[in-house]
């Protein structure tokens, strides 16, 4: 039996998506778009389904842990639904008499979305909800390990669609274990592509010829200065670093601690399960194998990671994460990069200025544009950090993983994909959210002239520099 042509297979999927999207748009209304988004959201949030998706994700990818996956699936989806609840995405969305411009919301068409194995349920759900809210169809290309979870998620979504009479072809996936060839074809023939995950996929997205929303790599660095509430900072860093076994791109990878509070902060870390390792070779010799992260250690529960790193007996019972002292930054110092594990790099700094300089060096090595953090009580230090670092976000006195991608206690949009601006080679510098899944048509009417005189524009310049 002849194997199906992979290119023709993707072409057929996208063709069906185009037919479904055209009908969805032609019969569209805000109520229809909202119901579709709710259907997809409930498909992952319904408790039994959420649990199954979380268990399946951990079982098939080996990444993260079930309780935190359940929390992530629920929290990220609930937050997104809060964000989009009252957002107009159909018909006239603004009508400004002063400018004479009326804006009409329009779908983009068929969205192609490449999603990672670290969040095989939450990330596609987030993309699907945003796409449906704005009148689009969407085709998911999961990572090979994420295929079973994505299949189950789409099955649940289609079951919800059946309740409200929606076409299954609005939400599809590339079948089988996927391939670079299939993914490349999806990138080429979609109307817009969204890519979260490997930087290889990101580069392919931006060179595909299709409008792309692709996000950069994370390598979060967080400063703990001499004014910080050390117990609060340690507790938040621990909660963030260990959540879902550090699978998030927003998980702290390094902290920079000011000398004046270094010993006191290490003591606070110990209280919450952070074990300090002063000989970095004990970790670098086992966390990397032949230049690659050790699969037995990444995104694992603490006891599994400790065993894989050969640290049994070197860290106390109850250790939740390992904090490794180092000073090196750059390609020859792997601890200065993303570790996708419960391993936290620790740098010492003489003062706040040196801490900022160290943070900048780490970000320029890896993670530029994503996000950094600071624990401080000095009001102007976040602004100093924001002006000094090539970053899109400065998270202040918060658990970084929970804050960066949207929180019920800050104003960031709920998302699993963080744009990194030009620093990270991205076209956006904000959290990927509903606005990116919609375009507008403008009706432009004539208004009374608003032409200024030359004096209105140049009087202050002429006063200073002359004509």
Image (tube, rainbow, N blue to C red):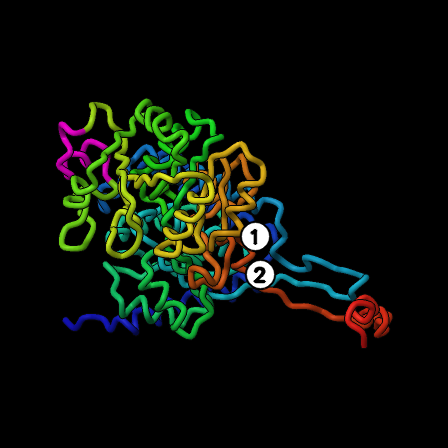
Rendering quarter of residue 66: top left
Q: 146 or 49: nearer the eye?
A: 146
Instruction: Give the image location of residue 347, x and y in percent.
Output: 33, 41
Would residue 145 appear left or right of 138 to someone viewing this image? left
Instruction: Give the image location of residue 198, x and y in percent.
Output: 32, 58
Q: Residue at x 81, y 66 (%)?
A: 460
Q: 464 or 164: nearer the eye?
A: 464
Q: Secondary structure at mark 2?
A: loop
Disc 1 crowd rating (10 Å Cα; few below 14, some 14-19, many 20+) is: some
Would residue 227 appear left or right of 123 to someone viewing this image? right
Instruction: Give the image location of residue 273, x and y in percent.
Output: 29, 26
Q: Secondary structure at mark 1?
A: helix
Question: Residue 284 has which mark?
Answer: none
Would you say the residues marked 2 and 1 are in contact, meaning their CB atoms lie under 8 Å apart? yes
Residue furthest out toward the bottom: 467
In which quadrant will I find the C terminus? bottom right
Q: Give the extent of the magenta segment.
A: 300-314
Disc 2 crowd rating (10 Å Cα; few below 14, some 14-19, many 20+) is: few
Q: 389 or 168: nearer the eye?
A: 389
Res 162 visible: no
Q: Residue at x 56, y 49 (%)?
A: 34
Would residue 464 appear left or right of 114 to someone viewing this image? right
- Whether the magenta-drawn stretch holds residue 304 is answered as yes
- From the viewer's perspective, is residue 393 above or below residue 349? below
Res 450 visible: yes
Q: Which residue is mark 2?
A: 27
Marks 2 and 1, how far apart in space? 8 Å
Q: Which residue is mark 1?
A: 32
């Amino acid at each position: 039996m002849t194997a199906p042509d992979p290119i023709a297979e993707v072409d057929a999927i996208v063709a069906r998506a185009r037919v479904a999207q055209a009908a969805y748009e032609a019969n569209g209304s805000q109520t229809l778009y909202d119901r579709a988004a709710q259907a997809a959201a409930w498909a992952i949030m319904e408790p039994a389904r959420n649990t199954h998706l979380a268990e399946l994700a951990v079982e098939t990818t080996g990444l993260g842990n079930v309780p935190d996956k359940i929390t992530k699936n629920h929290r990220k989806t609930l937050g997104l639904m809060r964000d989009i609840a009252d957002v107009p995405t159909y018909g006239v969305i603004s009508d400004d008499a002063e400018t004479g411009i009326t804006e009409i919301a329009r779908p983009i068409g068929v969205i192609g979305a490449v999603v990672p194995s670290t969040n095989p349920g939450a990330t596609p759900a987030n993309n699907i909800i945003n796409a449906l809210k704005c009148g689009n169809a969407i085709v998911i290309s999961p990572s090979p390990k994420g295929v079973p979870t994505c299949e189950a998620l789409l099955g649940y979504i289609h079951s919800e669609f059946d309740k409200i009479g929606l076409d299954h072809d609005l939400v599809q996936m590339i079948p089988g274990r996927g391939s670079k060839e299939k993914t490349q074809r999806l990138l080429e023939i979609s109307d817009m592509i969204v890519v979260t995950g490997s930087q290889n996929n990101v580069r392919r997205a931006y060179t595909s010829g299709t409008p792309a929303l692709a996000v950069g790599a994370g390598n979060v660095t967080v400063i703990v200065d001499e004014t910080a509430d050390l117990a609060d900072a340690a507790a938040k860093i621990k909660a963030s670093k260990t959540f879902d076994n550090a699978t998030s791109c927003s998980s702290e990878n390094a902290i920079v601690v000011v000398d004046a509070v270094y010993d006191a902060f290490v003591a606070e870390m110990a209280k919450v399960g952070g074990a300090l390792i002063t000989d970095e070779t004990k970790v670098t010799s086992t966390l990397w194998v032949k230049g690659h992260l050790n699969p037995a250690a990444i995104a694992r529960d603490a006891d599994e990671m400790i065993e894989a790193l050969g640290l049994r007996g070197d860290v106390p019972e109850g250790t939740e994460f390992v904090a490794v002292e180092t000073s090196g930054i750059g390609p020859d110092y792997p601890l200065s990069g993303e570790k996708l594990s419960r391993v936290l790099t620790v740098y010492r700094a003489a003062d706040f200025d040196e801490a900022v300089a160290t943070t900048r060096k780490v970000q320029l090595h890896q993670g530029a544009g994503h996000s950094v953090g600071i624990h401080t009580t000095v009001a102007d230090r976040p602004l100093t950090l924001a002006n000094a670092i090539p970053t899109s976000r400065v998270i202040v006195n918060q658990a970084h993983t929970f804050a960066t991608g949207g929180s019920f206690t800050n104003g960031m949009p709920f998302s699993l994909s963080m744009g990194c601006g030009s620093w990270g080679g991205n076209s956006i510098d904000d959290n990927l959210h509903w606005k990116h899944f919609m375009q507008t048509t403008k009706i432009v009417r004539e208004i009374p002239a608003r032409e200024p005189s030359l004096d209105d524009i140049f009087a202050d310049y002429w006063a200073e520099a002359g004509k």
